[in-house]
Each structure stands twice: as C-alpha cells, then as structure tokens.
Image (spheres, grey):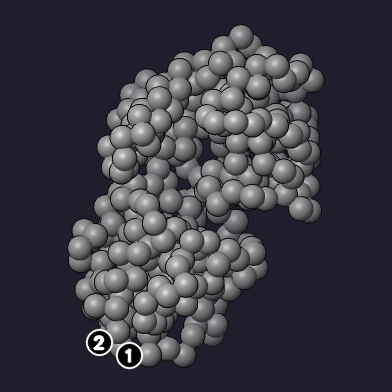
Amino acid sequence: MTAGPLRVAMISYYLPSTSKQGIGYQVHELATELVRRGHHVDVLSECPPVPGARYGHRHVEVSGSLRTFRFATALRRADLSGYDVLHAHGDDYWMWRRRTPRHVRTLHGSCFEEAARIRGAKERTRMVLLGLSEVLASLVADRAVVVSPGTRRWYPWVHDVVPNGVDTSRFHPDPGARAPHPVVLFVGTWGGRKNGAELARQFARDVLPRYPDAELWMVSRDVPADPGPGVRALGALGDAELADAYRRAWVFCLPSDYEGFGIPYVEAMASGLPVVTTPNVGARYVSDEGRSAVVTPLAQVGRALADLLGDTDRRASLAAAGLDRAREFSLARVVDRYEELYRASS
C-alpha cells in the first residue's frame, strides 16, 4: 500500500454522540487523530454524528430488537469499494468477502469473559453469542488485534496487542488544580459491572468516618437521586470538564468486575492521579500488574481508599509511576501502530 494518505472506513455501533460505551469514545479519538495526520476517515455507526467531529459519518440505521445483530447484517449492504482500509471495532463478522484491500479488526475485550460475570440468563446468553461473533470476526479480518494481553486467553491465535490510546495533551497533571479537600473520582455506571453503587457504599463506610469533608465525585449518567452521604453526581461531562475533574481529584477509583482495557485508568494516570482498582483484566494490564496502581479485591476498596487518602507520600509515588506508565498508552503511539498495520503486506 502506498505511503500517501489512506481512505479508512471505521465500523463502530457506538459513538459518544449518544452512547456511554468506551469503544465509541476510542473510535472517535482514533478517527480524529487519523484525520489530523491527513487521512480520510468515515465512521459507519448506528449513532448519529458527533457534533464538531473532523471525520466523516455514515449512518447505518436499524430498528427493532437485537439491534447490534441487525447492524452487523446491514453492514453487508454497505459499499466500501472506495476505501483502502476497513477498520472494524465490532460487528464485522458477516463481512468475510474482502471489501477493501485491508481489513483490520480490534477486539476491545472478550464477551466470553464478561458473560462469566454478568447477571441474568438472558444477558449471559447474549454475551456468549457476541463472543462467538468475536471469534468469527477475528478469523474474517486480515489482521486482528487485542487491546490487552489477557484477552488473548480467548483468542490465542491473535498475536498483536495494540492498546487503547489517550490524548496526553488533554489529560495531563496540574498539581495546583487539586481540590482543597479529599476527592475520590469515579467514571462509570452506578449499576452493573462498574460497581458504582458498591463504591458509594464503601465510601460511606470506610472513607467518611476518617475524612468527614471527603467527597466521591461520580461521572455517571445513572446515579440515583439520593446516592448517599458525600456523593456528588456529575452526570456526563464534556472533554474539558472531564480532564478538569481528573486534575482536581485526589484519587481515582473504578472497581469494575471486568474491563477489556479500561481507558479511564489511563486518563487518570496521565493526569497525575493515583489509581485504586480491582484485579480485572484491563486494570492489571494498564497498571503493569499493580506496579503503578493499588489493585485490591472489591471488598477492600473502601479501606484502600481511606489509607491512600491519608498517605501523601504513597499518593505521590503512585502518581509518578502512573504518569510514566501512561506514556505507553499515548494516542500518538497507538495511531503509529495502526498506521503500520494498515500498510502491512500480510
């Protein structure tokens, strides 16, 4: 493939215009950086376009139940003949006939892994079916990659690891911005595997008795009207507001049952914020097996937070280690790697 600008079609059911899924945010960042480098990018999505996006958007409209499966079927009818590269972030498992000179698939985690932790037989069945679709997609593509080494457990034939990337020009430290009182920051959902509700419960049990002026800031769309003492619901934040929240907090915590990668961990580390997390696949990778974060079982998260808030030296040490680790996941490095994959001969 030539060394000039490429025409790239990206597939993502999710985009940050209407979805809170991390995959959509990553696709938005990758597409934006590729356009900045001179490539032409169109994103095929069920979501509407992101306001102000620099890349193109092709709306794939679906309706009814099983929307992601309908989306994958609709993609079979999409004309991709004008593109050099198809980069899929999901739902390309029916596209086994070559549509572009190069087909790259990113596996952002494993639905099999999530199925083992999700509640409800219906949701578990759906995740298993999605896991089977991921297996098929990894075989359909010319080159498949995973975002963390632990994900290869489910796809041992996939050898390339390309992590998710974070814009370190937007997420960066500013010690002078720290709040005057202890603040724990959470980015995720109140319900489900992110365990926001459990974090709020442990915050009240373990943190507030030792630090009565502490607050738990929750960047989440589903926090209830009365989330508990010391909890401040921030809702969904824009890019600048989110980066500011990271710089103002004292500690970041996302005690998720499962993350294929965990972009918020890197955003926090890049912002100079020490991290407390649970030993999920993504957190273990991002934290370098606990070398740059506190990795603790879910039941002990509250005590770990309380101890860390009271230890200035430990917070500074973790912040430095996290900042160094975050450089491995800069958006620039990730896009460099994808450009190599787009142009690879095999």
Whether residue 87 is visible to the viewer of this picture, yes or no, is no
Tell me: residue 316, above or below residue 40. Answer: below
Q: Quadrant of residue 41?
A: top right
- Judge from the rendering whether residue 310 lies leftward or rightward of residue 4; answer left or right: left
Q: How many marks?
A: 2
Q: Position of residue 163 (x, y in %)?
A: 47, 42
Residue 298 found in image quarter: bottom left
Image quarter where the N terminus lies is: top right
Q: Are marks 1 and 2 in contact (CB under 8 Å)?
A: yes
Q: Specify the amino acid type for callout 1.
A: Pro
Q: Give the residue displayed 56% in from the left and 37% down from the top.
A: 337
Q: Which residue is mark 1?
A: 212
Pointer 2 local density, CA inside 10 Å: few below 14, some 14–19, many at least 20: few
- Residue 136 appears in the rendering: yes
Does 210 sit above or below residue 318?
below
Quadrant, the C terminus:
top right
Q: What amino acid is at disc 2? A: Pro
Disc 1 on helix, strand or loop?
loop
Percent x, y of residue 203: 30, 75
The label shown at residue 209 is: 2
- As helix, strand or loop, the secondary structure at mark 2 comes to loop
Question: Would you place residue 287 above or below residue 145 in this image?
Answer: below
Residue at horizontal 79 percent and vertical 20 percent from the top: 82
Cα distance between the residues tagged 1 and 2: 6 Å
In this picture, residue 202 sits left or right of residue 235: left
13 and 330: which is toward the camera: 13
Residue at coordinates 49% horizontally, 85% vertically from top-left?
A: 179
